[in-house]
Image: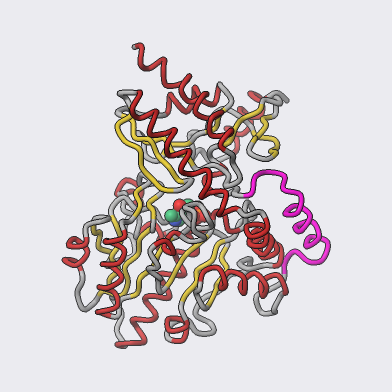
Amino acid sequence: MNMQEYIDEAEQSLLHTYNRYQIVIEKGKGVYLYDTDGIKYLDFVSGIAVFALGYGNKEYNDALKAQIDKVIHTSNYYYNMPAIRAAKKLKEVSGMDRVFFTNSGAEAVEGAIKAARKYAYLKDGTTDHEIIAMEHSFHGRTFGALSVTGTPKYREPFEPMIGNIRFARMNDLASVEELINDRTCAIILETVQGEGGLVPATEEFLKGVKALCEERDILLILDEIQCGMGRTGHMFAWQRYSVKPDIMTTAKALGCGVPVGAFLMTEKVAANSMAAGDHGTTYGGNPLACAAVEKVLDLFEENHIIENVREVAPYLEQRLEELKEKYDCITERRGTGLMQGLVFDCPVRDVIERALENGLLLINAGADILRFVPPLIISKENVDEMIEILESCIEPSEED
Ligand SMILES: *Cc1c(COP(=O)(O)O)cnc(C)c1O
């Protein structure tokens, strides 16, 4: 079949919840993906901040193959070695105390919300506690995660959401303070907002929120699903300012492609929230998923992934700033590390389409923001290659 035939067939059977770009991806190598016609694309999307290690990493692939030959799945009623090792390593890099593995980011957020509610319930014996979330946040598509997602259009057709969620403004401490009351059990935010437009929480805001939480015994939940796992030049973005959350979520790059997420908590929260029978998952933390997590964490260290981010990210930032200066249609550069955005004064779908035609994969964050979340192994040469293609895609709009 040629590519168009694959696409036609897909549209006969897959639920149309995405306006997909018109390529069928077949394989990947390093920072490049190939479609079924053999056309090569420089990938600045990495499956939306997932494939940190690059495609076709031999050690990663071998580790998964070896685990497949041992056992892919067992019940969480038994222990398995990859989960034990992965949890220990995740604790080491995060400084958190307890890990619960999930199958996705949204499920990690669900677990975090449940833990926070249970903690408050055990404290005062009542329910109906409130959670403060941020406007323009994104936490996933399941009901709990959607309820704390600060984009009304994602929520409205599916209401009612879970109750008692209040929305404050990111980087506006007073707006958080205003919403706190005796019922508040948790504040949830992304350390760097992804979907909402590549907005890092400022040091002042993060520290202010943390102080409010400590004062009132409110749990701070940091969603590190997109900004975590090295992307900002720190294993987790909160480590930059040493603002440790009570509960943290991770997913996306955690398994580098094998679907896995986790929520982690401090011992204090663990000892006073979730007990046996409170939460579960059939697949979460299965041996195959955890073999991936374990290997990813090993390779981050062995391949100096975070060091590479720290070396390449300033260069990417500089090149994007140059574009902003050069083109009137670009109004702002945002983000941190290898999680960057260019704000346009118009929708970016056309730029993305043209980039695709020229062998570059990019993705938006909201209609007007071009998002750059490449594999964490990219080089400065890859940045130059990306900028060259991108420039050729911006120019046409300049002329009309
Ligand atoms: C992607 C994302 C999620 C949801 O993760 P899924 O694996 O798609 O469920 C939650 N929070 C943030 C910050 C994300 O970027």
Above or below: residue 47 compared with residue 276: above
Asked if the magenta segment contains residue 64, the reply would be yes
Whole-percent x, y for residue 228 in the image = 49, 57
Specify how the rendered protein is coloured. secondary structure
Do we see residue 140 in this rendering? no
Residue at 67% from the left image edge and 25% from the top image edge: 39
Residue at 46% from the left image edge and 78% from the top image edge: 266
Answer with the quarter of the image where residue 258 lies.
bottom right
Quadrant (top left/top right/bottom left/bottom right) for the C terminus = top left
Whole-percent x, y for residue 288 in the image = 71, 62
Q: Is residue 191 left or right of residue 313?
A: left
Which range is magenta?
Answer: 53-73
Between 302 and 149, which is closer to the camera in this rendering? 302
Quadrant (top left/top right/bottom left/bottom right) for the N terminus = top right
Answer with the quarter of the image where residue 375 lies.
top right
Dominant SS of magenta comes to: helix
Asked if the magenta segment contains residue 369, the reply would be no
Query: How many circles with numbers are drawn on the protein?
Result: 0
Q: Is residue 261 left or right of residue 110?
A: right
